[in-house]
Image (cartoon, coloured by chain):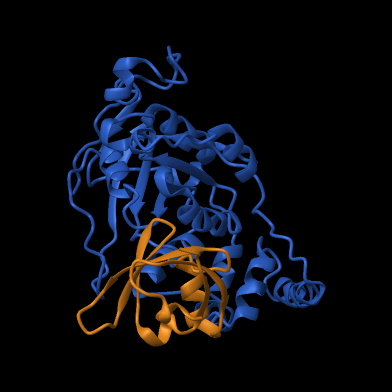
Amino acid sequence: MATPLPTPGVGRASADPDPGGGCASCALAPDAARLARLGLDPGRYSYVVALAGNPNTGKSTVFNALTGLRQHVGNWAGKTVARAEGGFSYGGVGYRIIDLPGTYSLLSASADEDIARDVLLFGRPDVTLVVVDATRLERNLPLVLQIRQITGRVVVALNLVDEARRHGITVDVRHLTRELGVPVVATAARRGEGLPDLLAAIEQVATTDDPPPPMRLVHHDPELERAVAALAEQVAARFPTLPNTRWVALRLLEGDPGIEAAVRDGTLGDLAAPRVAAAEVQG
Amino acid sequence: MTLDELPRGDRAVVTALDIRGGARRRLMDLGLLPGAAVHAELTSPLGDPTAYDVRGALVVLRRDQARAVHVEPEDR
């Protein structure tokens, strides 16, 4: 699949006339000047975006909107493992995007959820784009929190806001952004609404050298806190550069078989390896 | 009472989960935590399994799974 890269409409040097997006035509053709949909072939890419979320939140719609693909990507049940991947170019920079199966949690595993978890934990994407259903926020936020405990390189797409509006639901996006510590962008991917802002947020998170630290949940049970701290210390000794030892300690205390295996066979070290600089990947 | 005893069409609030390990984790991931409102929506012809509305999604549980979920029925 060696199709040449489509040339993005505008070079990187030219100033973006409307950085935040938001004009009426942009909403339909998302930041047309800067977005080039690359379909199945990402060509040379600098950044990897993993697309996660509960089932039926519109992940695939977001995927298709970004890549220009029209595939129906809902066939995850069973054992056939075929990750849906595509690419897009934004501001002249290539992105590879991986559409993951819908999952409620990274903690309890069905075969589908294992795929999502392995990519998020061990694939170390540059950006994890979590698509959440604005009409069922309570159901969707646990996954966001779980992902935030692993990484700060997260963008939340608050999708289906058009449907939420119809139900009389308004979400305080700024408040949610503040609490999660990562960009939250209201979208209606079906209609292209919010995609310019979403692309800008993805670019910002992908390129930052200083992502917010993983979220740390405080446990108010002193006994549990002691056990977590003691185990986290041992994990840190075994995997010195691992950023989220507390998270791993909690999984081990819970008896999570996937994490136990990762500790035993050393794949947990993949989480700890330093991030490859974008420039090297590009070359 | 436990969730399997909740009559179809009735609502209740989860009070406790009487189950351990992966099965407990799974129920929690599906939104069945203490404080969560549940609504018995549909029962299959043989009475098992039953579909419950939990936080906006339909969760289908077998009777032995539902038996592990302690609930306080809502006053009618």
Which residue is at the front of the view, B60 or A188? B60
Q: Residue furthest bottom?
A: B64
Residue at 59% over, 79% down: A263
Residue at 22% over, 55% down: A73
Say which colour chain A has: blue
Q: The chain drawn orange is chain what?
A: B
In x, y percent, where is residue A108? 47, 74
Asked where in the image residue A117 lies, by quadrant, the reply is: bottom left
Res. A92 in view: no
Which residue is at the front of the view, B5 or A125? B5
Question: Does A131 sit left or right of A206 as displayed?
Answer: left
Question: Does B45 sit left or right of A51 as displayed?
Answer: left
Which residue is at the front of the view, A187 or A46? A187
Which residue is at the front of the view, A200 or A279? A200
Residue at 25% over, 42% down: A64
In x, y percent, where is residue B72? 54, 72
